[in-house]
Image (cartoon, rainbow, N blue to C red):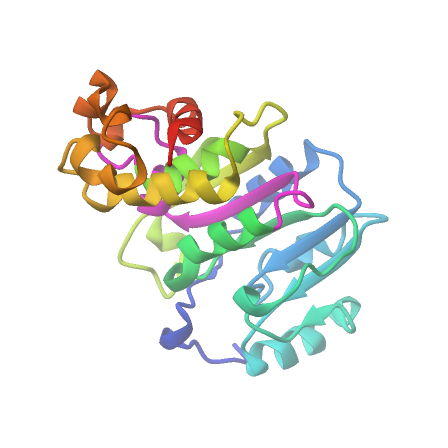
């Protein structure tokens, strides 16, 4: 190996070719012209992505050592690496693009929120996360892990949990299971007063998830509205659509 692993960057490099192939097969089921890989690391997935014909490909990698390694190992990637933190960059293409990656575990939730900022440009994401984050993104109301991430992501994307990935598929093996999910942009996003109101309501509701909605979100509604029986419920039983509808009744 010609590079070292950096714990501080949450680096767990994929080494299982079958898993790489499965992710690439998933990508191939959709048409796309531009692709951004987040955190290529040692290039396990990158080498497959560089072979996809006639697409515009870019990769974003923070670690200088990995950038140099990738440029040596895969000359085709030269000029297409964005050497920066994914959370700090602007969209790498002016047009629509797809996102793929074995996402760094220490920033995986923030990665999903960042993609939400780009949702007008990103119709699809296929990504590997620690299983717990993948399940949270995909879970439905009533589930123990349903929360802010589930609601905000699912308002704009359909989330499919594709498959588990065992720790032994990585170097070094993480302490947790991983999971690959696919996010597909919804064309039926529920109507809401504004995205700002929606985000505010959802975050406030789950901030005290043990309480009834009435106690958790009372600052956002008039006392008249709060008399509705709906507010006897807890946040985790409300669907994405119910949260969106509720924004129209906010102060």
Relative placement, left or right, of 222 versus 100 is left
Q: Give the quadrant of residue 220.
A: top left
Q: Position of residue 4 (x, y in %)?
A: 46, 80
User: Residue 119, position in %: x, y?
Assistant: 61, 44
Q: Which quadrant would the C terminus be assigned to in this image? A: top left
Answer above or below: position of 104 versus 9.
Answer: above
| Residue 139 screen position, x and y as percent | 35, 31
User: Residue drawn at (51%, 40%), measured in percent from left and top?
Assistant: 195
Q: Residue at x 13, y 37 (%)?
A: 210
Indicate left or right for 36 with 150 as reference.
Answer: right
Whole-percent x, y for residue 56 in the image = 80, 54
Figure check: 224 above or below 15 = above
Against 190, residue 65 (above or below) is: below
- Quarter of the figure with residue 226: top left
Residue 72 visible here: yes
What residue occupies the far left of the structure in this picture? 210
The question of residue 124 being in magenta is answered with yes
Left or right: where 189 falls relative to 30: left
Q: Which residues are magenta?
A: 118-146
For the residue pair 139 and 52, the one nearer the viewer reads as 139
User: Residue 219 magenta-drawn?
Assistant: no
């Amino acid at each position: 190996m010609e590079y070292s692993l950096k714990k501080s960057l949450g680096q767990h490099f994929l080494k299982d070719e079958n898993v790489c192939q499965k992710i690439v097969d998933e990508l191939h089921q959709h048409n796309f012209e531009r692709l951004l890989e987040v955190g290529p690391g040692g290039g396990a997935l990158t080498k497959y992505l560089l072979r996809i014909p006639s697409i515009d490909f870019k990769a974003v990698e923070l670690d200088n050592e990995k950038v140099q390694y990738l440029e040596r190992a895969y000359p085709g990637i030269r000029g297409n690496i964005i050497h920066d933190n994914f959370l700090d960059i602007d969209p790498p293409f002016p047009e629509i693009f797809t996102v793929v990656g074995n996402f760094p575990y220490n920033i995986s939730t923030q990665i999903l929120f960042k993609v939400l900022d780009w949702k007008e440009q990103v119709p699809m994401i296929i990504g590997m996360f620690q299983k717990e984050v993948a399940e949270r993104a995909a879970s439905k109301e009533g589930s123990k892990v349903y929360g802010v991430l589930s609601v905000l992501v699912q308002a704009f994307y359909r989330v499919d949990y594709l498959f588990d990935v065992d720790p032994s598929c990585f170097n070094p093996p993480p302490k947790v299971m991983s999971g690959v999910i696919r996010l597909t942009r919804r064309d039926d996003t529920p109507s809401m007063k504004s995205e700002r109101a929606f985000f505010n309501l959802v975050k406030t509701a789950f901030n005290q998830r043990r309480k009834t909605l009435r106690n958790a979100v009372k600052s956002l509604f008039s006392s008249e509205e709060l008399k509705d029986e709906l507010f006897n419920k807890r946040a985790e039983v409300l669907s994405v659509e119910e949260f969106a509808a509720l924004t129209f009744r906010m102060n």
